[in-house]
């Protein structure tokens, strides 16, 4: 394995109580500075699926997002957007509750509700299930996406992490489009953004078990970061005490060459996975539930 392959398939895990310090430590471990140019159009994509405070584990902590903004600005990037969309709840209200408006004002960067963005229909090459999808123009114009989801289980996909966070780039109503044959469609969606998503940072300060929206918060005090969203999701799944082989999209994504799902081929930096693992309660959907239409949120 080449050195570049080792870096690409590495996932950094840092445990602590200081979000800014933790984010920066993980970014340093994966050598993230070399991934961004000052001329990049950077989109930072948190998860604000519902109007709930980050202390619930449902939404990305604004302190994590602010640390990412500062990291990007220190590289010399001037075109920075924090953007989120999706179908669940009121995105504008979520911006207020999570405190992101204060962050973007303080940092002098743009905040975009992707639900109100222009839509561009994209045909997916050699799809498994998703032949065409509407994507927010802001996401397509970006040259670098920094993916900042939370650490959560999901009632249909088992987990909702980096790959599934891309659903917030879809307009309109991603859940109604994606939840039937969700694993295949997640892989199709990820294939669109394989080259744009340069960094993946999971806010694991507080996770969520039982359900992605109405579940119970789990204090974890973790940040997980990597270049490869499949590898980051695989390690995060293991951190939640879930057998990653049960998460179908991870294996499908690896087969499609989108990243590394095999835990034995992922180099973990910082904390050891087994030292930070906590078994999350989750629901394992039946085949019928995965193949019928659903109107639940992401």
Image (cartoon, rainbow, N blue to C red):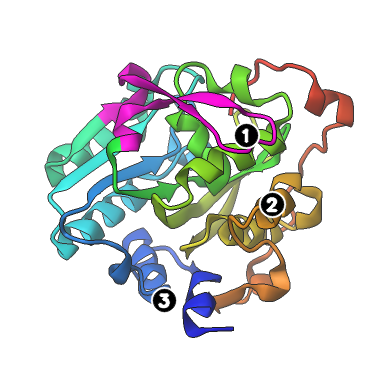
Mark 3 crowdedness (10 Å alpha carbons): few <14, some 14-19, many ≥20: some
Q: Name the element at disc 3.
A: helix
Which label's residue is closer to the chain start, 2 or 3? Answer: 3
Quarter of the image that includes the N terminus: bottom right
Which residue appears at 74% of the width and 29% of the height? 181
Asked if labels 3 and 2 touch by Cβ distance under 8 angstroms, the answer is no
Q: Work out how far the residue at label 2 is from the one at label 3, CA to CA, in angstroms.
A: 23 Å
Find disc 2 in the rendering and name its residue: 250
Quarter of the image that includes the C terminus: top right
Find disc 3 in the rendering and name its residue: 29
How many numbered marks does the figure carry? 3
Which label's residue is closer to the chain start, 1 or 3? Answer: 3
Task: Mark 1 vs mark 2: give the one in front.
Answer: 2
Task: Mark 1 vs mark 3: give the one in front.
Answer: 3
Find disc 1 in the rendering and name its residue: 212
Q: Which residues are magenta?
A: 112-140
Horizontal and vertical percent position of residue 151: 57, 48
């Amino acid at each position: 394995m080449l050195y570049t392959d080792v870096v690409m398939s590495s996932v950094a895990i840092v445990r602590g109580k200081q979000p800014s310090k933790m984010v920066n430590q993980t970014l340093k471990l994966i050598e993230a500075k070399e991934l961004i140019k000052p001329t990049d159009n950077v989109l930072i994509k948190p998860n604000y699926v519902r109007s709930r405070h980050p202390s619930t584990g449902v939404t990305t902590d604004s302190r994590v997002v602010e640390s990412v903004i500062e990291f990007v600005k220190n590289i010399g990037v001037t075109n920075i957007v924090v953007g989120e969309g999706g179908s669940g709840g009121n995105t504008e209200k979520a911006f207020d509750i999570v405190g992101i408006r204060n962050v973007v004002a303080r940092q002098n960067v743009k905040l975009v509700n992707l639900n109100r963005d222009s839509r561009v229909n994209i045909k997916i090459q050699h799809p498994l299930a998703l032949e065409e999808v509407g994507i927010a123009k802001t996401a397509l114009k970006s040259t670098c996406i920094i993916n900042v989801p939370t650490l959560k289980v999901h009632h249909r996909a088992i987990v909702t992490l980096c790959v599934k966070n891309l659903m917030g780039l879809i307009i309109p109503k991603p859940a109604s489009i994606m939840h039937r044959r969700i694993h295949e469609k997640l892989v199709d969606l990820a294939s669109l953004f394989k080259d744009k998503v340069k960094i993946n940072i999971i806010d694991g300060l507080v996770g969520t078990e039982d359900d992605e929206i109405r579940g119970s918060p789990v204090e974890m005090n973790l940040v997980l970061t990597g270049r490869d969203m499949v590898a980051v999701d695989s390690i995060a799944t293991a951190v939640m005490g879930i057998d990653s082989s049960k998460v179908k999209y991870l294996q499908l994504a690896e087969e499609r060459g989108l990243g590394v799902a095999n835990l034995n081929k992922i180099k973990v930096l910082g904390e050891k996975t087994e030292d930070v693992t906590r078994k999350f309660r989750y629901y394992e959907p039946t085949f019928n539930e995965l193949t019928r239409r659903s109107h639940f949120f992401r």
